[in-house]
Every structure is written in structure tokens, then in C-alpha cells.
Amino acid sequence: MIEKAVLKSFNLTDYTASIMLSGSYKTPMEKVTVANNIPSAAMIGGRQVAVLFYDGYNSKDAVILAVYD
């Protein structure tokens, strides 16, 4: 399942991000893996991201596939 989210922060060290799913205004998801083909310069807080969830809404089973405005 692919969902829209807003990027809150990006960790260059382990290439993970904190995101807020669209429609969810309470709890951000932490440590979401970012696809390695996305340049770190594109990971700016406030940008929209597309997130692929493999098995439910668990940050361990998710990956950010794309960044867009």
C-alpha cells in the first residue's frame, strides 16, 4: 500500500526519516527507511513523500519511495 506523508526530519547517518502520514496530526512515524536512490539534498522538512508499506502501518516495514512538492 502506498500512502502520502509529510517529511518532518531526515537522518543522513542511517538514511531514515521521521514522517507524518496525511490525515494523521498526532504522532509522527520515526526511523522510516529512505530509498538510497533519493538524494539527501531532496530530503527537506515539509516536503511531500510517498511511502510504501509492506505489512500494515509499521515503520519497520515501510520505505520512502519518492519526494515531491
Image: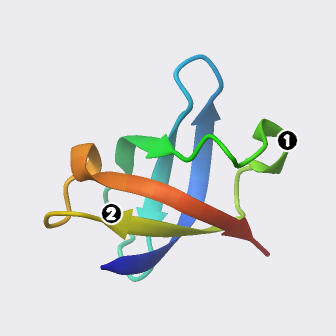
* 2 vs 58: above or below: below
Q: What is the x, y in percent for residue 10?
A: 62, 37
**Farthest top residue?**
13
Q: Distance between the residues labelled 1 and 2?
A: 27 Å
Q: What is the x, y in percent for residue 59?
A: 28, 49
Q: In this orientation, which residue lies closer to the viewer: 22 or 25?
A: 22
Q: What is the x, y in percent for residue 25?
A: 39, 70
The answer to whether marks 1 and 2 mark residues whose Cβ atoms lie closer than 8 Å is no
* 14 vs 36: above or below: above
Residue located beneath label 2 in the image:
26
Q: In which quarter of the image is the C terminus?
A: bottom right
- Packing grade of label 1 (10 A; few <14, some 14-19, many >=20) is few
Residue located beneath label 1 in the image:
41
**Farthest left residue?**
56
Horizontally, residue 41 falls left or right of residue 36, namely right
Horizontally, residue 50 falls left or right of residue 57, namely right
Kindly state the secondary structure of the residue where label 1 is placed.
helix
Horizontally, residue 57 falls left or right of residue 66, namely left
Identity, as a three-letter code, of the amino acid under mark 2: Lys
> Of the numbered discs in the image, which one, if any, rests on residue 5?
none
Mark 1 vs mark 2, foreground winner is 1
Q: What is the x, y in percent for residue 6?
A: 57, 66
Q: Which residue is drawn at 44% across and 42% down?
A: 33
Question: Which sits earlier in the primary sequence, circle 1 or circle 2?
Answer: 2
Q: Quadrant of the N terminus?
A: bottom left
Q: Residue at x 65, y 24 (%)?
A: 12
Identity, as a three-letter code, of the amino acid under mark 1: Ala
Q: Which residue is drawn at 31% across and 56% down?
A: 27
Kindly state the secondary structure of the residue where label 2 is placed.
loop
